[in-house]
Amino acid sequence: MSKKILIIGGVAGGASAAARLRRHSEEDQIIMFEKGPHVSFSNCCLPYHLSGVVEKADDLVLMSPEKFASQYRIDARTNQEVVTINRQQKTVTIKKLLSDEVYSESYDKLILSPGAKPIIPAIPGIDKVNAFSIRNVVDIDRLNSYIKGSDAKNITVIGGGFIGVEVVENLKEAGYNVTLVEAMPQIMRPFDYEMVQILHKELLDQDVNLIVADKVVKFEDNITILASGKAIPSDVVVMAIGVSPETNLALDANLKLVIKVALKLTKTTVLMTQIFTQSVMR
Ligand SMILES: Cc1cc2nc3c(=O)[nH]c(=O)nc-3n(C[C@H](O)[C@H](O)[C@H](O)COP(=O)(O)OP(=O)(O)OC[C@H]3O[C@@H](n4cnc5c(N)ncnc54)[C@H](O)[C@@H]3O)c2cc1C
């Protein structure tokens, strides 16, 4: 018997689940909700828009709701946020973000793939700098447009993980003065300290102002102040200190969370730690 399956989140996890479910069954009704304007975009390529390697932000978008409908008969609904789950009635409430209209859908199966959002710590004075974070096409487009549309020269990236390093690489490629601040004694923590010296040297060779073992304590007007007292001119600040899983919806519905950590090879950074938080409800 055919089932009605709802999916919350329409990027890597949600879109893959939807496509896989369609391969398993021609009959099932599959609806995928995404609160952002895009489904299935290339997160891995987001930083490469800053250097122009990916010229247009639209080129980062891999699929559209129209293609999901015509190729897979998947109903992808963008700009729609699932706001509550009622497990007893097997329904979800959805808010259309462009019109504020609220409606509900029933389900036989519900898949949560809401991902993780960038951590923005409450560092004093954060409102005194132009601070950005990167999660999706909207974010990178906003950052890129701001940088290119202003006379920004000095950009400070906070956090020397995979995303921070890729952002540094692409901003440097685009010709900016880039400072990378990392609180730990090394960038890219999954690597041994000794091996990371190769990466540190590469950044220094590329004229990146690399600062390790020093952390941001506050911001003043377009200046990043570190614990050491260093003051870094920062026309733009990119926060890349990590992500936090979007678990509110699941917790509100009293769902038990399953957290898996997977390791994966990537083009420039070799290793990426990926945290999936997907809960499947019956
Ligand atoms: C700049 C950058 C570079 C990256 N580079 C790499 C790389 O090189 N290699 C690699 O393996 N990984 C990389 N990643 C990580 C990778 O993008 C993530 O691991 C992957 O996107 C996780 O997919 P997801 O579907 O679980 O979550 P997400 O991509 O976070 O998607 C979840 C979606 O669910 C939506 N959502 C959340 N709550 C709701 C709700 N209530 N209703 C409707 N929609 C909702 C969100 O808007 C979001 O779009 C990178 C990430 C970034 C930000």
Image: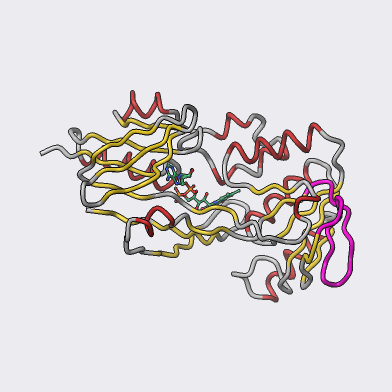
Q: Residue at x 89, y 69 (%)?
A: 229
User: Residue 95: horizontal and vertical position, in percent?
Assistant: 41, 36
Q: Which residues are magenta?
A: 219-236
Q: Residue at x 67, y 38 (%)?
A: 49
* Residue reaching furthest to the left: 1
Residue 276 picture quarter: bottom left
34 lies left or right of 157: left
Q: Is residue 205 visible?
A: no
Q: How is the image coloured?
A: secondary structure
Q: Quadrant of the N terminus?
A: top left
266 lies left or right of 113: right
263 or 248: which is nearer to us? 248
Q: Is residue 154 depicted above or below 144 in this figure?
A: below
Q: Is residue 153 visible?
A: yes
101 lies left or right of 43: left
Q: Is residue 189 depicted above or below 134 in this figure?
A: below
User: Residue 66: horizontal and vertical position, in percent?
Assistant: 40, 24
User: Residue 265: horizontal and vertical position, in percent?
Assistant: 52, 57
Q: Residue at x 36, y 47 (%)?
A: 84
Residue 225 among those drawn in magenta: yes
Q: Residue at x 85, y 50 (%)?
A: 222
User: Residue 165: horizontal and vertical position, in percent?
Assistant: 69, 56
Residue 280 picture quarter: bottom left
Residue 42 among those drawn in magenta: no
Number of residue marks? 0
